[in-house]
Image (tube, rainbow, N blue to C red):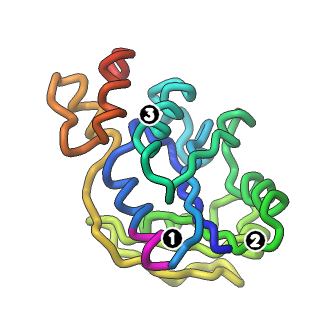
Amino acid sequence: MKIGILGGSFDPIHFGHLIAAQDAFEQHKLDRLILMPAAQAALKPGNAQCPAADRLAMVRAAVDWDKRLEVSDYELQKGGISYTIDTARHLKKQFPGDQLHWIIGGDQLPRLHLWREIGELAKIVGFIFLERPGHPARTHTEVPGLRLCRCDGHLIEISSTELRARIRAGLSLDYFVPHKAIELIREKNLYR
């Protein structure tokens, strides 16, 4: 099986995340796609604005109807800084005969050499990268053995930072965030 993993803070999850997931799923003919909320992103210290349980609930609410997408709470249950190498090792044990593909934004390519144990990670997973608006991908990296696959798709410039600012300003999240996630944000008064 070909398994894609899309990690992130999902703080909050938005249609940019979901369209990227769908594009990777379809273009690379994935059998499964796992959304993996991070407990704490290693290269973005202190970035999560919302408690882990609420971020997980928003992700689950956003995709509970879509059988192509799964949600894993592995990194949240593990806690601490979420290093991709640890998650990849866990998934490789869980799915030993399957191909793992980590989905990233093209803006992450120049930073891959900073990822913990990137050489070992490159042996476990291939990378599917999506170009993000305003961040043209530089596909040459200094990581030996790195397997890169490009994903062309419907790139939508939405940032979670912008969405949190919209909430604080009293603006609508409609057409940016799935409705069920918006309901959770309102119900729990998140990001205010």
Residue 35: x and y, percent?
Answer: 54, 51
Q: Which residue is mark 1?
A: 109
Mark 2 neighbour density, 10 Å: few (under 14) some (14–19) many (20 or more): some
Q: CA distance from mark 1 to mark 2?
A: 17 Å
The image quadrant where one finds the C terminus is top left
In the picture, residue 21 is in which quadrant?
A: bottom left
145 falls in the magenta region: no
Q: Earlier in the sequence, mark 3 or mark 2?
A: 3
Magenta residues, start to end: 23-28
Between residue 80 and residue 141, name the one nearer to us: 80
Q: Residue at x 24, y 44 (%)?
A: 176
The image quadrant where one finds the N terminus is bottom right
Residue 89: x and y, percent?
Answer: 80, 59
Q: Secondary structure at mark 1?
A: helix
Q: Which residue is mark 3?
A: 58
Q: Earlier in the sequence, mark 1 or mark 2?
A: 1
Mark 1 neighbour density, 10 Å: few (under 14) some (14–19) many (20 or more): many
Residue 139: x and y, percent?
Answer: 48, 82
Amino acid type, label 2? Ile
The image's mark for residue 124 is: 2
The image's mark for residue 42 is: none
132 relative to 127 in the view: left or right: left
